[in-house]
Amino acid sequence: MTDEHPPLIHAERSRRAVRILAIRRLLIEKDVVTTDELDDIIVRARARTPADGAKVVARAWLDRAFRERLLGDARTAVADLGYQLSHDAELAVVENTVDVHHLVVCTLCSCYPTSLLGPPPDWYKSFAYRQRAVVEPRAVLREFGLELADDVRVRVVDSTADVRYLVLPRRPAGSEGLGEDALAQLVTRDSMIGVAEARSRDRV
Amino acid sequence: MPAVHDRGGLPTDEPIDRSDHQWEDWEHVTNALVGMLRRRGLINVDELRRGIEAMVPAEYESSGYYGRWSASIETLLVEKGILTEAEIDAVAAEMDSEWG
């Protein structure tokens, strides 16, 4: 990604794409930013996955004291595992139980715990999800293939620039005896947003 | 009437499209520029958000996610006197002609 070969793949060149690339060129010329640092951020952003979030969940399933700390003060708890949140917003972890299922949305924009989950999926940023999740969460969950029993309470939590939510999904039945790495394999991105449950062991 | 960014509860029958698009390079650049400008202390997240929320509703709705970020970055850099619209216009026109 250099100035000699302008980064415009996928052909569709929108006005906004051209404007931001012009801004990039100007900021480099004025020494406000450097290509090396920009490229470094791009490489690191591309490498981010939900794997860190999955490890946090797996630890919480195994370690009761950690789970309590995670639910009480998530920033400090994940820091103990070596994960520093790159955002100023607080992280709040909400626990799914037999009685309550949590679903995370950001109605105002797309606030998301990227430090632990990587970039959000497109649907999380879509108007349809942002608009519908708070008024018809069960219908939304059904679209994702999750049918909850009538007696399970659905609690929708709305992330903001100040608080970002992560769901601690229920530990799947049949996962007894698994170690932390194996458990982490059961934890999907969608289960940490709340549109799915963690995978059962036989579906890994 | 809520502001355009306040989407919660706005009626729609639209199903949720679960397909993910591959980020185009300009989207990566937009994301990285926000990261760097934050690191330099030149913009913060609340300013970025304010720039997005100040968009003309029709533009907000048609811009797409990183299009909105891109618009806000431009607004903030011009407001802060780091770049001018005229400079951006000139380089954008140059790029348009370079790339045909």
Image: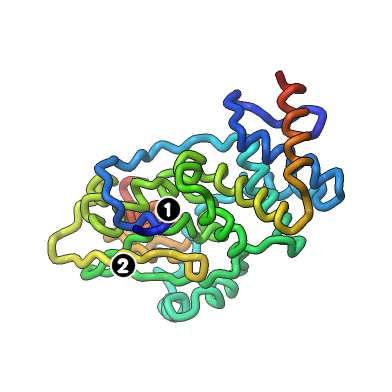
Rendered image quadrant of residue B81:
bottom right
Is the residue B49 above or below the residue A145 in the image?
below
The foreground one among B38 and A41 is: B38
Asked if one can make out residue A111 in the rendered structure from this viewpoint, the answer is: yes
Q: How is the image coloured?
A: rainbow
Q: Of tags 1 and 2, which is closer to the observer?
A: 1
Type of the residue with mark 2: Asn
Q: Are labels 1 and 2 assigned to the same chain?
A: no
x then y, percent, for residue A166: 43, 64
Q: Which residue is mark 1?
A: B4
x then y, percent, for residue A26: 80, 43
Q: Residue furthest left?
A: A150
| Label 2 CA crowd tier, 10 Å (few <14, some 14–19, many 20+) | many
Element at label 2: loop
Q: Residue at x 43, y 64 (%)?
A: A159
Residue A96: numbered disc = 2
Asked if one can make out residue A51 in the rendered structure from this viewpoint, the answer is: no
| Label 1 CA crowd tier, 10 Å (few <14, some 14–19, many 20+) | some
